[in-house]
Image: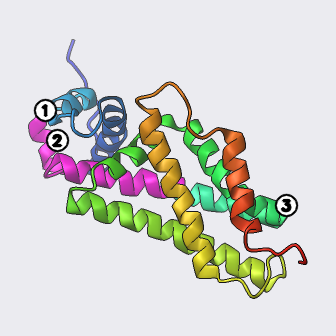
């Protein structure tokens, strides 16, 4: 009997590699994952892998931009819906919503953490910078909308508040990196909710 194998198109093969490599990177880490292990997980030769990606770094970055971008858009959509339904409380929960999404996809969460561990590489650092910039811009848009609708005081500085919110995200990422080597969680869900509350309420006077 002939060995009949499904031949994938170039785009299908590329998508399959991205999906399988995501798991390998999450399990082994960027530094430890080699092209041999990635190719084996994909059921292809290293030569075939290099036909689609010129380096391990290019593969990792494409995974980050593709899957990380999808994750980011899901988060934005959920937070926007929360703000529409819950007002300021929905905005305060932006950070815990991010954690919930990461918990639902731990493989991707590992990759998000890894790229911030590799910022000695200029390309990795640029990807991390763009990611945080997109978070800052989204928070700024939310704050400006909240100011315009009276949800937040008009006199607050949206840029500063968005930057403060981005710093909380950096804290979450750093905490996750430490947690990966420690059984004790440094930030509980309750503490994260409290951070979100403090983030907005710090700009609101008791007279408001």
Read off the residue under disc 3: 86
Read off the residue under disc 1: 45
Question: What is the distance, in whole Å, between disc 1 and disc 3 at their CAs?
Answer: 51 Å
Q: Nearer the viewer, mark 1 or mark 3?
A: 3
Quadrant of image for the C terminus: bottom right
Q: In what element is the residue under mark 1?
A: loop
Number of other residues with Cα within 10 Å of mark 2, as a class: few under 14, some 14 to 19, many 20 or more: many
Number of other residues with Cα within 10 Å of mark 3, as a class: few under 14, some 14 to 19, many 20 or more: few
Q: In what element is the residue under mark 2?
A: helix
Read off the residue under disc 2: 49
**Cβ atoms under marks 1 and 2 closer than 8 Å:** yes
Image: magenta residue range: 46-71
Question: What is the distance, in whole Å, between disc 3 and disc 2 at their CAs?
Answer: 47 Å
Give left or right: position of 170 versus 92. left
Quadrant of image for the N terminus: top left
Give left or right: position of 162 versus 63. right
Most foreground residue, 139 or 158? 158
| Residue at (23, 28) in percent of width and height | 43
Q: Identify the residue at the far left of this view.
A: 47
| Residue at (81, 60) in percent of width and height | 89
Q: How many marks?
A: 3
Q: Is residue 78 visible?
A: no
Most foreground residue, 13 or 180? 180
Label 3 vs 2, first from the N-terminus: 2
Give left or right: position of 51 versus 191. left
Q: Identify the residue at the far top of this view.
A: 1
- Assign the magenta stretch its main secondary structure: helix
Q: Position of residue 175 (x, y in %)?
A: 49, 43
């Amino acid at each position: 009997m002939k060995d009949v194998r499904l031949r994938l198109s170039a785009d299908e093969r590329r998508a399959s590699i991205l999906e399988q490599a995501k798991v390998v990177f999450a399990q082994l880490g960027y530094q430890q994952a080699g092209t041999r292990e990635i190719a084996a997980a994909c059921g292809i030769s290293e030569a075939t892998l290099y036909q689609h990606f010129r380096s391990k770094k290019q593969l990792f970055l494409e995974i980050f931009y593709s899957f990380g971008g999808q994750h980011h858009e899901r988060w934005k959509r959920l937070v926007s819906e929360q703000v529409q339904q819950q007002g300021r409380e929905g905005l305060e929960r932006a950070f815990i919503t991010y954690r919930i999404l990461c918990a639902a996809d731990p493989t991707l969460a590992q990759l998000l953490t890894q790229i911030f561990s590799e910022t000695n590489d200029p390309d990795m650092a640029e990807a991390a910078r763009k990611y945080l910039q997109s978070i800052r811009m989204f928070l700024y848009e939310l704050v400006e909308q909240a100011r315009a609708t009276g949800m937040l005081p008009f006199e607050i500085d949206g840029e500063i508040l968005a930057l403060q919110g981005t710093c909380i995200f950096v804290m979450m990422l750093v905490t996750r990196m430490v947690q990966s080597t420690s059984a004790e969680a440094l930030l509980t869900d309750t503490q994260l909710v409290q951070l979100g509350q403090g983030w907005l309420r710090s700009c609101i006077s008791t007279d408001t």
